[in-house]
Image (cartoon, rainbow, N blue to C red):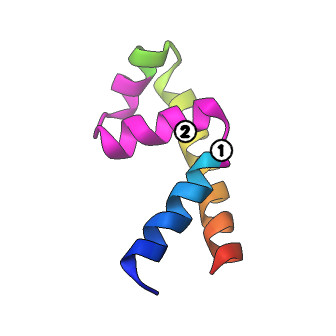
Amino acid sequence: MERSEDVRQMLSAVSGLSWRDQRVIRLRYLKGMSLAEVGERINISKERVRQIQNRALVHLREAMEVEA
């Protein structure tokens, strides 16, 4: 699969997440923020950030497998 197709699939998968899940993923992986930093930014505990991140990653993996 070409890189552009991979990027398209990932963007499509991310757009299927809830707004909060998208925000956590963007802050963690695009901005490089720590769990604690994300938690401070959106006013939740770092443990809750971890839970949201893990759930979002499961959804992204599933979405990418379906589209592959």
Q: Residue at x 67, y 49 (%)?
A: 16
In the image, which disc is placed on residue 17? 1
Q: Which mark is residue 22?
A: 2
Q: Whole-percent x and y of residue 13? A: 61, 57
* Tags 2 and 1 touching, CB below 8 Å: yes
Residue plotted at (47% across, 42% down): 25
Q: What kind of element bears circle 1? A: loop
Residue 52 horizontal/vertical position (percent): 60, 37
Amino acid type, residue under disc 1 in the picture: Leu
Residue at figure coordinates x 36%, y 46% from the top left: 29
Q: Which residues are magenta?
A: 16-38
Residue 67 is left or right of residue 5, and the answer is: right
Instruction: Pick whichever, 12 or 35, lies toward us.
Output: 12
Does residue 41 sit above or below 53 in this rendering?
above
Mark 2–mark 1 Cα distance, whole angstroms, equals: 6 Å
- Count of numbered marks: 2
